[in-house]
Amino acid sequence: MDVKIDFSNTIIETDRLILRPWEETDLHDLYEYASVEGVGEMAGWKHHESIDVSHKILKSFISEKNVLAIEYKENKKVIGSLGLHRSWANEDAAYAHLKVKEIGYVLSKDYWGKGIMPEAVKALIKTCFEKFGLDALTVSHFIFNNQSRRVIEKCGFTFVKKGLYHSEQLARNFQDMRYILFR
């Protein structure tokens, strides 16, 4: 069953990161990483072609309260996002009774390969189970996205099935791999 998660008063700290609600002052950091070709496309959205697009997305992050900014402590820069969304498991009879959310994440290309996303996802998993009382979390990646697959494996998710994801923004379908992690 889909549940509403509100990150308004949530701050999660790890060794290198602060996961926190988005602020208007994060606009330039968001645009900096989201405007790089290949970053958004790995998650099913077109890279931002203007700061106006980033501002619209930032406003939705702030109003919907379900996506956290990933701030890198060393330089106090927002380098990605980590959110909770409606899960594919809500439509699957085997899991529909569970309180479950889908994790989605994006990281600046400058920080790929440094173990940052597994660090952020593991911290979010702990918070989701302990603070928000979720029964399970799901996550998916496009079949060609090996970086995401590695994050998912490092965080202990179990593969469930292949699926098909339609990206409205990219106007195409992607085969994806779907995973679950139980509390």
Image: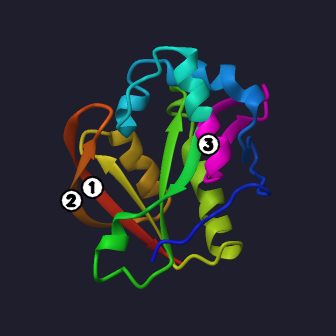
Task: State the image coordinates of residue 93 (x, y, percent, origin top left).
Answer: 28, 82
Quarter containing the C terminus: bottom right
Q: Residue at x 58, y 67 (%)?
A: 4
Task: State the image coordinates of residue 61 (x, y, percent, origin top left).
Answer: 62, 42
Please determine whether, in this image, residue 98 is positioned above or below residue 173. Answer: below
Which kind of residue does numbered mark 1 sit on?
Met
Q: Residue at x 41, y 57 (%)?
A: 153
Q: CA distance from mark 2 to mark 3?
A: 28 Å
Tell me if I can see residue 97 in this picture.
yes
Nearest to the observer: residue 58 or residue 163: 58
| Disc number for residue 162 | 2
Nearest to the observer: residue 168 or residue 150: 168
The answer to whether 41 appears left or right of 134 in the picture is left
Q: Which portion, as a residue range, is magenta?
A: 59-80
Determine whether the residue tagged by mark 3 lies in a helix, strand or loop: helix
Which kind of residue does numbered mark 3 sit on?
Phe
Which kind of residue does numbered mark 2 sit on?
Lys
> In front: mark 3 or mark 1?
3
Please determine whether, in this image, residue 175 is positioned above or below residue 54. Answer: below
Residue at the extreme top of the image, as rendered? 50
| Disc number for residue 177 | 1
